[in-house]
Image: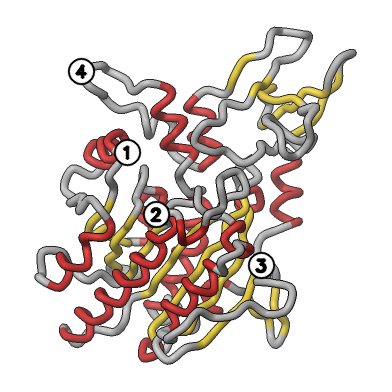
Amino acid sequence: MKKLSPISFGSVCSGIEAASVAWEQLNFSPAWFSEIDKFTSSVLAHHFPGISNLGDLKGIKEKIQTNIASAPDVLVGGTPCQAFSVAGLRAGLADERGSLSLAFVKLADSIDEKRHEEKKPPAVVLWENVPGVLSTKDNSFGCFLGGLAGEDCPLLSPRGGWADAGCVFGPKRAIAWRVLDAQYFGVAQRRKRVFVCAVGNSLGISPAQILFEFEGSRLDAAPRNSSGQALASDAQGCSNDHEKVIVIQGNVIGRTPSNGPGGKGYSETGVAFTLNCTDRPAIATANDVPVRRLTPVEHERLQGFPDGWTDIPWRGAEGAPDSHRYHAIGNSMAVPVMRWIGSRIAASLRGGC
């Protein structure tokens, strides 16, 4: 069996490191992390004791320039979504958290500059956020795309706004983006996120080949209905006199919520609504057993993490507080989606291997 060449990556706004969990089997190697939250930083230190946490994203550019940190093959990160989320204030780039997306662009430029000095090709850039970034009043997404592409001004959205998928080409990078939903990648959670892949023009790789699938001249969709149907076969509804109870892989773990898709709980297909940093969806068992709440382990499974990933020693205690675990898990990415994208990045960088 041919040994896969290693691919290094730097992770910003690392959280509990969905990228590292997803990409380990693909022979990706983390060069460094960037995280400021105390609990999630402790999760990183627990699982990856040999990898440096560089702290604030805004300080990494100087570390790259002064050779304190390496310039990796891939830059990945999901800058804070609250500035763009429909659940937040949607202040866009005026929100300090939203402006971190522009700091992310500057870091990507710094990495490519250093790699050019080292006679290495440009890095592959992967960014994740909520779909709300596509529709902010200040055109946050156009500003972000313009910066990555190397333009001097923001890109203007087409008539009708930014679509859920597209490509742009600039003097510095080619960029593709696409909204993907975790429920079609093997986890029982509705989680739509926009993924942006940018590649330096001299690398000779198309970001569209990473995020899109082509068959001849026809563009295929990402895993959608077929995967959803496979998931639904493991999520069966059973009724009693009062409610529909959801069964996933033989375990009764959910019920149909009364407040619709925007509420907390599970749909009739047994797919959880999007987890966030505060959610503890109420679920029920059959025969009118009292309602209970999802456990942290169930949250980890809904994101595709190993059981107990966030259950680390914390401030002298053997295990971490549930509140800290819910917050960290809800802020993370879905591991199976990251694995799918990572496999396509790896195939592109390794020439289809």
Q: Nearer the viewer, mark 2 or mark 1?
A: 2
Closer to the chain start, of discs 2 and 4, is 2
Is residue 58 depicted above or below 166 in this figure?
above
Q: Give how far apart the Cα atoms at labels 3 and 1 are.
A: 30 Å
Q: Give how far apart the Cα atoms at labels 3 and 4 are.
A: 46 Å
Give the residue at mark 3.
164
Tag 3's secondary structure?
Answer: loop
Q: What x and y, as percent, mark residue 211? A: 55, 71
Among the 4 quarters of the image, the one containing residue 345: bottom left
Residue type (three-letter) at the residue carrying disc 3: Asp
Among the 4 quarters of the image, the one containing residue 158: bottom right
Tell me, for residue 40, which label it has, or none. Answer: 1
Closer to the chain start, of discs 2 and 3, is 2
| Mark 3 crowdedness (10 Å alpha carbons): few <14, some 14-19, many ≥20 | some
Q: Give how far apart the Cα atoms at labels 1 and 4 are.
A: 16 Å
Residue type (three-letter) at the residue carrying disc 2: Glu
Give the residue at mark 4.
316
- Left or right of 274? Residue 325 is left
Q: What x and y, as percent, mark residue 262? A: 72, 39
Residue under the point 10% across and 69% down: 67
